[in-house]
Image (cartoon, rainbow, N blue to C red):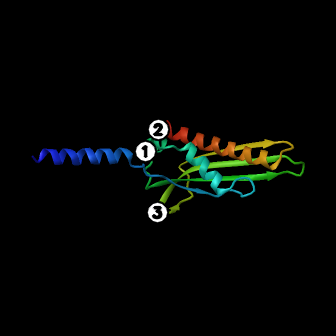
């Protein structure tokens, strides 16, 4: 019978689609290496933007047309205070690996720690980037 091969093909396609990894946004990081390295920034993005969130956001902002940029800057003041600024932005994508710096949504967070060590400053940078990503994510969820 012809129905069994068609049924088997349909089951195979639906099963492979269920396990297919959803498309991922292009994410670029332009952080100051002293407070946030690229690998650390990408790990934070990956943790904050899980597959479920990406699927939800991609309905309004398709992966092929949008991407994200992050930027963490800062360092130490003369009196050993750590000052951090973190930004997360949703920006248009023009080609496969290029984004336009014209934010559709953005968030900037600030933080400081007095008498900080370099590890405390890096931890503050990570926390502020997480906070900025969460704010952009929540602004996309309200639409």
Q: Which residue is mark 3?
A: 96
Residue 49 x, y percent position in the rendering: 53, 44
Q: Quadrant of residue 123?
A: top right
Asked if 57 appears above or below 39 in the picture, the reply is above
Residue 107 located left or right of residue 18: right
Residue 26 x, y percent position in the rendering: 51, 56
Identify the mark nearer the N-term, 1 or 3.
Answer: 1
What is the number of callouts on the image?
3
Q: Which mark is residue 143?
A: 2
Residue 56 located left or right of residue 111: left
User: Are the residues at dot 1 and dot 3 in contact (C-beta closer than 8 Å)?
Assistant: no
Q: CA distance from mark 1 to mark 2?
A: 8 Å
Report the residue at 43% width, 56% height from top.
Answer: 64
Q: Residue furthest top?
A: 142
**Circle 1 or circle 3, nearest the eye:** 3
User: Are the residues at dot 1 and dot 2 in contact (C-beta closer than 8 Å)?
Assistant: yes
Residue 105 located left or right of residue 21: right
Answer few, some or many: residues within 10 Å of disc 3's Cα (few below 14, many 20 plus, some between 14 and 19): few
In terms of secondary structure, where does tag 3 sit? loop
Answer few, some or many: residues within 10 Å of disc 1's Cα (few below 14, many 20 plus, some between 14 and 19): few
Q: Which mark is residue 60?
A: 1
Residue 65 x, y percent position in the rendering: 44, 55
């Amino acid at each position: 019978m012809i129905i069994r091969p068609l049924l088997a093909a349909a089951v195979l396609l639906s099963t492979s689609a269920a396990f297919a990894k959803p498309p991922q946004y292009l994410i670029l990081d332009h952080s100051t290496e002293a407070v946030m390295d690229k690998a650390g920034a990408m790990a934070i993005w990956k943790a904050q933007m899980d597959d479920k969130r990406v699927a939800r956001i991609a309905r309004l902002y398709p992966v092929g047309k949008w991407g994200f940029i992050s930027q963490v800057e800062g360092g130490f003041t003369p009196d050993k205070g750590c000052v951090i600024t973190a930004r997360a932005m949703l920006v248009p994508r023009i080609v496969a690996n290029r984004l336009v710096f014209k934010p559709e949504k953005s968030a900037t967070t600030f933080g400081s720690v007095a008498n900080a060590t370099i590890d405390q400053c890096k931890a503050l940078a990570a926390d502020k980037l997480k906070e900025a990503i969460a704010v952009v994510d929540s602004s996309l969820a309200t639409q």
